[in-house]
Amino acid sequence: MTVLPRSLCSCLCRAEDSAMENIVTEKKAEESHRQDSADLLVFILLLTLTILTIWLFKHRRFRFLHETGLAMIYGLLVGVVLRYAIHVPSDMNNVTLSCNVNASPATLLVNVSGKFYEYTLKGEISGSEVNDIQDNEMLRKVTFDPEVFFNILLPPIIFHAGYSLKRRHFFRNLGSILAYAFVGTVVSCFIIGLLMYGCVMLMKQIGQLGGDFFFTDCLFFGAIVSATDPVTVLAIFNELQVDADLYALLFGESVLNDAVAVVLSSSIVGYQPEGDNSHTFEAMAMLKSFGIFLGVFSGSFALGVATGVVTFTKLRDFPLLETALFFLMSWSTFLLAEACGFTGVVAVLFCGMTQAHYTFNNLSPESQDRTKQLFELLNFLAENFIFSYMGLTLFTFKNHVFNPIFIVGAFLAVFLGRAANIYPLSFLLNLGRKYKISSNFQHMMMFAGLRGAMTFALSIRDTATYARQMMFSTTLLVVFFTVWICGGGTTQMLSCQKIRVGVDTDQENFIGPDGVERRSTKQESVWFFRIWYNFDHNYLKPILTHSGPPLTATLPACCGPLARCLTSPQAYENEEQLKDSDSDLILNDGDITLAYGDITVSTDATGAHTSGTPVGGVAVNSDEALDRELAFGDHELVIRGTRLVLPMDDSEPPLPLDSRRHRHKNETMS
């Protein structure tokens, strides 16, 4: 029998231990991989079930529950099953040893028999849950990192809002939208913050407050719940073809106030007065926070517009590569803004608006269709995923703090904050609007102030403190209530307020909410947008796109060499087929000249028509001349040096103007 040396035996033992350790590690990694795959499969099945049920609802024309509310219900059901019906048996190999550590470091190095192991902090658990550590691990795996929402799920939602913006109705109500989004959101934030601070003081007096809750926390809560997300209401509006101005007011406010709420919440977090007590009021600290708000918003706006302008692709011969480049540059706008200390939500929103206005015209027809469909798909999946996850977190999140007094106070404060946003601002705006925001529109806007993805993402981003945990739990309930009750009651509210549906948004003349016949002309747009449009149409579009008029037609004759240098060859090729997607924004009576045959019809700013005299010396009525022009042949529309050639079909006999409008409306609705 051969006796091995002791040193060799020790080496063999260590090798065997190391091999066994590697086998165990690989087995645990494989089990973790399977668990992660099962968790993702749960979310995929949730989305699949939601899509199938949406199809059933649309087939049956069921509007009492929108897809987002449905996704939340499915998430709730799965959360109940994961929390109470599934139990993971404990692993006997997991041994909990106690060691005294004064702090809770994010990374912990443990020395076990001379070997160092790295452990990562995953959160605090109560002493009663130590034996259920495996169940906690399972629930923790279905709880996503909050950064996933900000960096992965939010960008396509916000970008799609800007990229699919209906600019005609948006800019026609731009002044009112800006007032609701900026002034209204700030007013709502402070109203909710003040009311919640009073509620917190009441809780403190009766001994219902279990931790610190400062006025800055109340303002932060006011900022995050002021972000409206009426996706349910707008989907029903679009399906029923509700008045375009009401749609534009709600959509524009929700798009911009999401951006305002994000910057406002970060400014409140950045409020740091000097001294020991960081929650006292100090004028300089408040001014500094206001400066941070302006700086972050303006910087994010400039970054988004700049990246949108420079996305000037020249890969038209390869639509797949062109679409991929467009997608990557759009998404990188969000990440670039966050990396630079700005707000990605604001940057990607205005990037989408800028790219829809400029870059879209440079894309090939295939890429134009692909980008629209791609971001529409991503928006749909991301939005439904977030709403499913909301229902899931109600039961899987481990640190909920539900306080009845705080919850009741939050619902009351949200209602009063929304009312303080809509009604006083509408009264002030109506003083300067030609076409007033009617009372039934105001009631509908008040009712449609739903909370959704942005509110949830802002509240879940930080749940480390007692105050943030209470705000997160209450925010979930606010989102559930508004989506289910307010979103589900949209159709009934439209009927109650007698708001017209089935409105053709493309018709030229329509009856406004005040009963007055109105025209969709440039006169309804705000004055500074009219000035901006003329500058943009004549100078920026020719430089940045191929769809604008050549600079040789808009710049003075002395600038001819510069104009020829800056104008692309495609602009000359497209000059005869020029179609400006925003032309319906600027067709003002004072800017239009219709030239046909020997007759020239123009209009002044008051709407009065004037007509030239034909060769025969017989005056022709301008309305008759316009009807004749629309009925026969080709006609040219001259707008500030830009010639638009609109071919007409001569294969069928001309119809009277009213009959043609009626037929167009029927074709659109069918």
Image (cartoon, rainbow, N blue to C red):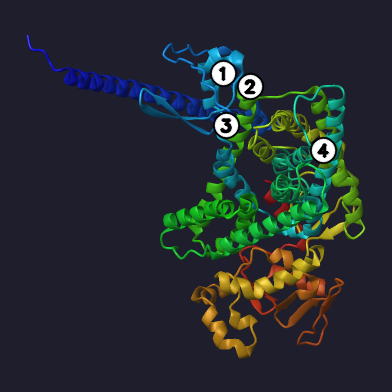
In three-dimensional space, the C-alpha distance between marks 2 and 3, rounded to whole angstroms, equals 23 Å
Q: Please name the residue shown 76% across and 63% down the image.
A: 656
Looking at the picture, does residue 501 appear above or below residue 642?
Answer: above
- Please state which amino acid type lies under the numbered disc 3: Ile
- Report the residue marked by disc 4: 447
Q: Residues within 10 Å of mark 3 (few under 14, many from 20)?
A: some
Q: Nearer the viewer, mark 2 or mark 3?
A: 2
Mark 3 or 4 closer to N-term?
3
Mark 3 element type: helix
- Report the residue marked by disc 1: 82
Mark 1 or 4 closer to N-term?
1
Left or right of residue 586: residue 102: left
Q: Please name the residue shown 88% across and 51% down the image.
A: 426
Residue 445: where, in percent of width, then height?
A: 82, 43
In three-dimensional space, the C-alpha distance between marks 3 and 4, rounded to whole angstroms, equals 27 Å
Q: Which mark is residue 51?
A: 3
In three-dimensional space, the C-alpha distance between marks 1 and 4, rounded to whole angstroms, equals 34 Å
- Report the residue marked by disc 2: 395
> Is label 4 in contact with label 2 (beta carbons under 8 Å)?
no
Q: Which of 519 and 165 is in front in this view?
A: 165
Q: Nearer the viewer, residue 128 or 100?
A: 100
In three-dimensional space, the C-alpha distance between marks 4 and 2, rounded to whole angstroms, equals 28 Å
Looking at the picture, does residue 343 appear above or below residue 612?
Answer: above
Residue 244: where, in percent of width, then height?
A: 76, 51
